[in-house]
């Protein structure tokens, strides 16, 4: 069994095998959102989406993911 293709946990796009469960694009978005939240901890999802040029939906998805992985609190 050699599975080299998996789907990104966030955008569901197929990606090549990596150590992460999410694709590069989503990692960048997570980073961007993480940095923004660090600077503006009390900000709302729609404000984050606006500031990072993402749809509210994908911003919400990423934030939920970050919280579930506790990524938010490690940064
Ligand atoms: Zn992705």
Image (cartoon, rainbow, N blue to C red):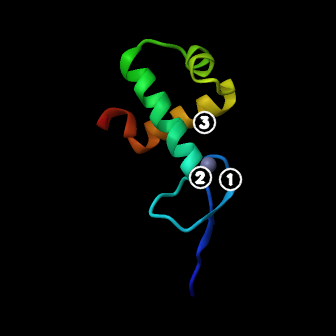
Residue at 38% from the left image edge and 33% from the top image edge: 72
Give neighbour class at mark 2: few <14, some 14-19, many 20+ (Cα, 10 Å).
some
Which residue is under mark 1?
A: 12
Q: Residue at x 66, y 24 (%)?
A: 56
- The residues bearing labels 3 and 2 have C-alpha atoms spaced at a distance of 10 Å
- Does any atom of ligand 1 lie closer than 8 Å to the CB of label 2? yes
Percent of width and height locating residue 3: 59, 78
Give the labeled residue for mark 2: 9
The residue tagged with tag 3: helix, strand or loop? Answer: helix
Q: Which residue is mark 3?
A: 61
Q: Is residue 10 above or below residue 58?
A: below
- Reply above or below: 63 against 21: above
Dot 3 or dot 2: first in sequence order is 2
Q: Position of residue 27 (x, y in %)?
A: 51, 45
Callout 1: CB less than 8 Å from ligand 1: yes
Marks 1/3 in contact by CB < 8 Å: the verdict is: no
**Crowd class of label 1 (few under 14; some 14 to 19; many from 20; radius 10 Å):** few
| Total numbered labels | 3
Q: How far apart are labels 2 and 1 at the CA level?
A: 6 Å
Q: Position of residue 52 (x, y in %)?
A: 57, 23
Q: Quadrant of the N terminus?
A: bottom right
């Amino acid at each position: 069994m050699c599975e080299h293709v998996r789907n990104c946990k966030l955008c569901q796009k197929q990606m090549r095998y990596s150590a992460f469960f999410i694709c590069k694009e989503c990692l960048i978005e997570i980073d961007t959102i993480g940095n923004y939240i660090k600077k503006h901890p009390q900000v709302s999802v729609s404000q984050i989406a606006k500031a990072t040029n993402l749809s509210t939906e994908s911003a919400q998805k990423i934030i939920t993911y970050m919280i579930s992985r506790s990524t938010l609190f490690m940064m």
